[in-house]
Image (spheres, rainbow, N blue to C red):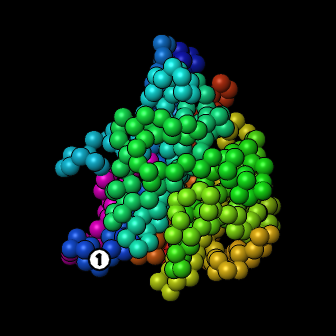
Amino acid sequence: MYTVGNPPNQVQIAFSGYADPSMRRDPAITTANPYGTNLWMLYSYPLFNQSGAPVTYSGAVETHLAYSNPNPSGEPGGVAWAAWCTTTPSCPSATAMWPSVQSNSPTYPYPTQFSSHEVPNFWPYNNNWYAVHLMYFVIPPDSIPKSIGKSGCFVMTVAQTTPTNLAEGWAANTLNQCGATLPNDTIATNVEISFTQLNGWSGASCSVWGEPAIMVDNTGTAYLAAACFNKNFEATLGYYIFSTSLASYPTLSTWTGYAGPIYLADLPDASFYQGLGATYLTEFDWARRADGTLVGMVSPAVETGQNTVSQFGCVVVNLNPPASWPSGSGSFFGSVVATLTDIDTPQTGTISEAYGPNACTYEPTSNTGVLIVRRLVNTALTKPYSPTQYQLYSLIDTGVMP
């Protein structure tokens, strides 16, 4: 936590914790994973970078990786988690799957910038791990939303055997690319998807794209879900689904629009959330049950000003089979399985859960059930500060297994 300003106008700001989780079972049968039940989780790791004189604190996000293995004594996966890092046995806090790295390049794209990697999502299939996340460069003193609009893109990555190999080519001194090729980005399996390309695939006119989620079905077809945001960073323009055959993955020319737009109004019981003020859906994720059926998690939300989004918990819903997903929405969602929220933390002064939780993920073999992200904010902050400058995140297991 940092203190900004001078008495009597001191404001404490924080941007830290664990957010945007994507939890998956490792299906590979190995000596270390004899039952194919070890768990992996990608998650966002928010932080502040420091630059300039006087010092400017700029928010950015890294992507980290954690794992949970069933205990030989019978303790199931999901009870205890450990951070994965590239150096063992120690695991310094600065180590990340995809780190936030400073560049002082005089030419691209700005003199001082920090790479940022958030909302990661991944999926295992046939000994490979497929991943996608949002990448952009934070240019101090720009906010994260402004930075996404200037330099954002999706990055798809594929790795063999284990998700730890997704880190190849993303070493601590590597900026990688988003809008241009930069030095040190040598891994061919890192593929950039520009917002312009996503607009072309969908036929939409989105200012930015976000909240990507990837999935591979049993036929070897990959699906990418993404939220279309307007200039106010509201996903009122809907979710879109894109697809391609893994035979040509990750070649971008083979991706096509598959379904969408999918709106809040298409969610069963949408009128309840509309009555609360929600105007769009965000934070979508999906999971496959043992019987092959799909279940999804999504959050109704509304933009409440000062780059702050209020979310109304997570709706867990059955997903219809991909063959029935329409190009005009309506039958993407099946019935609602559960509704989850997290508004139970006692308010301490101005620190509260006033803007609701932030995202859910689910893996049927984890004893955690659905994970929900607790988000604490400082509701007293006013311009030039905002509630986005005091956000603390933590992961809460609900025990709900839809």
Is residue 123 magenta-colored?
Answer: no
Name the residue located 64 percent from the left edge and 77 percent from the top edge. Answer: 322
Q: Is residue 163 visible?
A: yes
Asked if 90 appears above or below 361 in the picture, the reply is above
Residue 359: x and y, percent?
A: 57, 57
Residue 323: x and y, percent?
A: 67, 80
Residue 367: x and y, percent?
A: 40, 73
Q: Nearer the viewer, residue 368 or 24?
A: 24
Q: Give the residue type that dot 1 points to.
A: Ile
Judged from this view, the residue extending furthest toward the bottom is: 291
Specify start and end residues of the magenta stretch as a single range: 63-84
Name the residue located 60 percent from the left edge and 67 percent from the top edge. Answer: 244
**Magenta highlight: main SS:** loop
Element type where label 1 sits in the image = loop
The image quadrant of residue 146 is top right
Q: Nearer the viewer, residue 179 or 91?
A: 179
Asked if 129 appears above or below 16 in the picture, the reply is below
How crowded pointer 1 is (Cα within 10 Å; few <14, some 14-19, many 20+) is rated as few
The image quadrant of residue 321 is bottom right
Name the residue located 31 percent from the left edge and 53 percent from the top edge. Answer: 84
Q: Quadrant of the C terminus?
A: bottom right
The total number of labels drawn is 1
Residue 238: x and y, percent?
A: 75, 58
Asked if 104 appears above or below 80 in the picture, the reply is above
Judged from this view, the residue extending furthest toward the top is: 53
Is residue 70 magenta-colored?
Answer: yes
Residue topped by disc 1: 29
Q: Is 260 left or right of 179, judged from the image as shown?
A: right
Q: Is 252 left or right of 278, judged from the image as shown?
A: left
Name the residue located 55 percent from the left edge and 58 percent from the top edge. Answer: 251
Q: Is residue 4 visible?
A: no
Q: Quadrant of the N terminus?
A: top left
